[in-house]
Amino acid sequence: MVKFLLVIQICSAIHGNCLPEQRVNVFDSWYDCAAFGTQETTKLMELIGEDLINNNKIYITFSCRPQNEV
């Protein structure tokens, strides 16, 4: 059975760099992974705050990567 690893990365468009990828969790379905990733990016934006995001042009990406179960 294939599971999906959620990976989130925070980047700055101004500085042209990203923090290291963060592995968040493993999910049983693509839907669960994508839904959780969407929610987490919103929470992270709220945590980082509007001023810091605007001043550094911060953006957050996430991906759901297939993981074969052993």
Image (cartoon, rainbow, N blue to C red):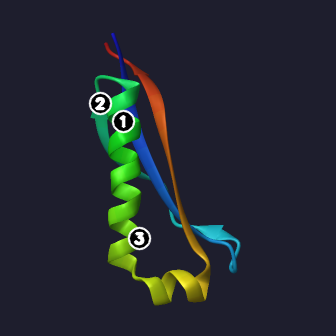
Q: Amino acid at mark 1?
A: Cys
Picture quarter with the N terminus? top left
**Residue drawn at point x = 61 percent, y = 78 percent:** 57
Eye-nearest disc, 3 or 2: 3
**In the image, 16: left or right of 4?**
right
Of marks 2 and 1, which one's residue comes earlier in the chain?
Answer: 2
Observer-nearest residue: 12 or 17? Answer: 12
Discs 3, 2 touching: Cβ within 8 Å:
no
Residue 67 location, quadrant: top left
Discs 2, 1 touching: Cβ within 8 Å:
yes
Q: Label 1 belongs to which residue?
A: 33
State the image coordinates of residue 63 (x, y, percent, origin top left). Answer: 50, 41
Of marks 3 and 1, which one's residue comes earlier in the chain?
Answer: 1
Characterize the local packing of mark 2: few (<14), some (14-19) or many (20 or more) Cα atoms within 10 angstroms.
many
**Residue drawn at point x = 30 percent, y = 34 percent:** 26
State the image coordinates of residue 9 (x, y, percent, origin top left). Answer: 50, 58
Of marks 3 and 2, which one's residue comes earlier in the chain?
Answer: 2
Q: Amino acid at mark 3?
A: Met
Tell me the element at label 1. helix
Q: Label 2 belongs to which residue?
A: 27
**Residue drawn at point x = 45 percent, y = 52 percent:** 8
Picture quarter with the C terminus? top left
Q: Label 3 belongs to which residue?
A: 45
Q: Examine the rendered structure and indicate whether residue 8 appears above or below residue 67.
A: below
Characterize the local packing of mark 3: few (<14), some (14-19) or many (20 or more) Cα atoms within 10 angstroms.
some
Residue 18 location, quadrant: bottom right
Tell me the element at label 3. helix
**In the image, 56: left or right of 2?**
right
Instruction: Specify the farthest residue to the top.
Output: 1
Marks counted in the figure total 3
State the image coordinates of residue 44 (x, y, percent, origin top left). Answer: 36, 67
CA–CA distance in space, label 3 to label 2: 22 Å
